Image (cartoon, grey):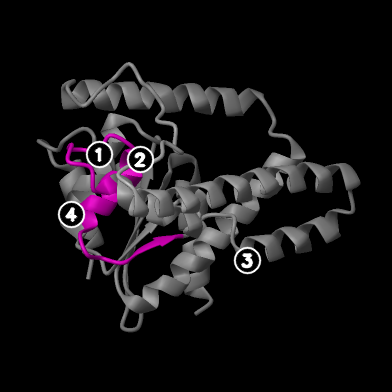
Amino acid sequence: MIDCDAVASEATAEDADPRLDPERVRCLPGDGDRGSVLVVGVVHDHPASVYRAVHLVTGADPDVLALELPPLSVPLFRRYARDRHTPPRLGGEMSAAVRAAGAVPVVGIDAPNARYLRTLAARLRGAGSRDLAVAVARDTARGVAQAVACRLGAVVARLTPYTPRLYTQIPYESTLLDAPGAQATHEERHLARHRAFVGVVKAPPATALIDRAREDVMAARLHELRVRGDVVAVVGATHLDPLADRLAALAGDG
């Protein structure tokens, strides 16, 4: 079982790697019937986040690896993880975590999926807004199209020597060649800019509804996966606290 205290101690030790920032990690201890859940927050594709995901997945040795990816997209990221480069050239922290997990089952917990569509439909009925429904439908259609494209890309990669670049890597000024402290500082600056933006710009109603639905669905799936043992979940840093709060509530409900 994942030792949450040990994870926290490593991150807060005097000589700790600064990329293992305790603010980027949440851990829900297991009990007799359910495994622990270690939620790793990342800045997608950032080198500090790639390191953090790989290090914590390797150290936790989970029974399940859960990723902020649609289930349809997981096979393509498995293909990315087979790259001979370290870390893989495509897929960022997601494919790097897949490689670190080895033979562990990998589960995509993000939208679109059937539970997400049901959740959206229920919330839209309650909202009673046509404009909101149209905006959500457009976003959902884009998400489904991207997930299907990733699934087809995985088929192409399996049948041919070609691996499609259906995932666009986010470029940063910081790289894995930089010192750990420089990587961690750059990552924090990026998050600080995002927090400042969110603090002054209110998200559109459709975006807020979609994010809440995604987080509810991801938390519910993680709660289900705990019956299979310990879980490490790799998700965007903005989802870290909402997921931790929802998981704690679900655990309290039994």
Query: Does 3 sit left or right of 30 as displayed?
Result: left
Question: Which label sits on residue 91?
Answer: 2
Q: Are marks 3 and 1 in contact (CB under 8 Å)?
A: no
Where does label 3 land, which residue? Answer: 114
Residue 80: name its quadrant. top left
User: Three-letter amino acid code at disc 1?
Assistant: Pro
Report, in whole angstroms, how far the alpha carbon at label 4 lies from the one at label 3: 31 Å
Tell which residue pokes out farthest to the top in this image.
173
Q: How crowded is mark 1: few (under 14 residues within 10 Å), some or many (20 or more)?
A: many
Q: Do the residues labelled 1 and 4 touch (CB within 8 Å)?
A: no
Where does label 4 land, which residue? Answer: 58
Q: In this view, does 148 lie above or below 28?
A: above
Q: Which comes before the other along the chain, label 2 or label 4? A: 4
Residue 213: name its quadrant. bottom right
User: Three-letter amino acid code at disc 3?
Assistant: Ala
Q: Are marks 2 and 3 in contact (CB under 8 Å)?
A: no
- Residue range in magenta is 81-108
Residue 43's x, y, as percent? Answer: 39, 35
Where does label 1 land, which residue? Answer: 88
Q: Which comes before the other along the chain, label 2 or label 3? A: 2
Instruction: Identify the residue shown where x is 20% and y is 59%.
Output: 102
Q: Which comes before the other along the chain, label 1 or label 4? A: 4
User: Three-letter amino acid code at disc 2?
Assistant: Gly
